[in-house]
Image (tube, rainbow, N blue to C red):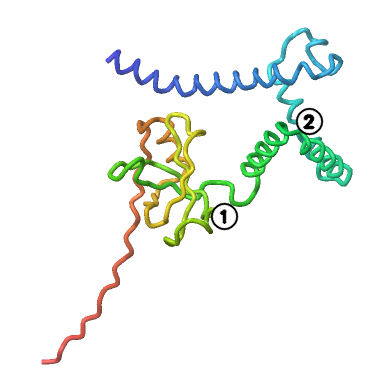
Amino acid sequence: MLRNNFIAGVVVIAPIGLTVWLIWAVVGWIDGWVLPFVPDRFNPEQYIGINLRGVGVIFFILFTFLVGALAKGFVGRSLLRIGESLVSRMPVVRSVYSGLKQIAETVFAQTETSFDQACLIEYPRKGLWALAFISTSAKGEVARKLPPEGDIVTVFLPTTPNPTSGFLLFLPRTDVIVLDMAVEDAAKLVISAGLVTPPDRIPEAAPETPSLRTGTGG
């Protein structure tokens, strides 16, 4: 009885504690990175003598909004073009900047950014199945140079327990088994290494239409 109560308590406390710890750590990391750039006269710690966690996050959000507002204006776009032209002349920096910019635009753009569906693919060999995510149909040179085997889809195969790394695969749609589970549920399944299984979404069968029988008159 005591053991079961203890395990039940751990199940309740562990997710809450880990979530709070993660948020606390991320906020502290942002504060440590941002606050050194904030002038002392704007730092509340200089007036109240207490290190308020989260002040750096507030400054970061305000600064990001300000940069976004300026970037939308004519002057901001002009300065951005000038800055990018200078960066494009630096051999190593331009490669890093262009790669990070493309990733940011892909992640934060409003169209075609999220995974469409979760799926199963045979990987790394026939008979072994892996959970992956369909992002979009193959486009550009990749789609043009691949053998004409029908519709080619872009699939991201994540690693466990870190789904931010993985493999980018291009597969015929016929080799992909689309799952009914939500992308969020599939991500939980990957992160938990199969321990957190989402509920099975059994497709509802279409109601049968009663057939009309025509009787023969006697």
Quick one: quadrant of the C terminus?
A: bottom left
Q: In the rendered view, would you say 212 is above or below 200?
A: below
**Which x, y percent locates residue 99?**
65, 38
**Front residue of this view, candidates 27 and 161:** 161
Q: Residue at x 68, y 17 (%)?
A: 53
Q: Residue furthest top?
A: 49
Q: In the rendered view, would you say 187 is above or below 137?
A: above
Cα distance, mark 2 to mark 1? 39 Å
**Could you tell me the amino acid type at mark 1?**
Glu
Instruction: Please identify the quarter of the rendering in which residue 91 is found.
Output: top right
Q: Residue furthest bottom?
A: 218
Determine crowd level at label 2: few under 14, some 14-19, many 20+ residues with C-alpha closer than 10 A.
Answer: few
Quick one: quadrant of the N terminus?
A: top left
Instruction: Please identify the quarter of the rendering in which residue 30 is found.
Output: top right
- Under tag 1, what secondary structure? helix
**Which x, y percent locates residue 84?**
79, 39
Number of the label disc, if any, that sits on residue 157: none
As drawn, is 76 to the left or to the right of 118? right
Mark closer to the chain start, 2 or 1: 2
Q: In the rendered view, would you say 103 is above or below 25?
A: below
Q: Residue at x 58, y 56 (%)?
A: 140
Q: Which residue is mark 2?
A: 63
**Front residue of this view, candidates 183 and 20:** 183
Determine crowd level at label 1: few under 14, some 14-19, many 20+ residues with C-alpha closer than 10 A.
Answer: few
Q: Which residue is mark 1?
A: 141
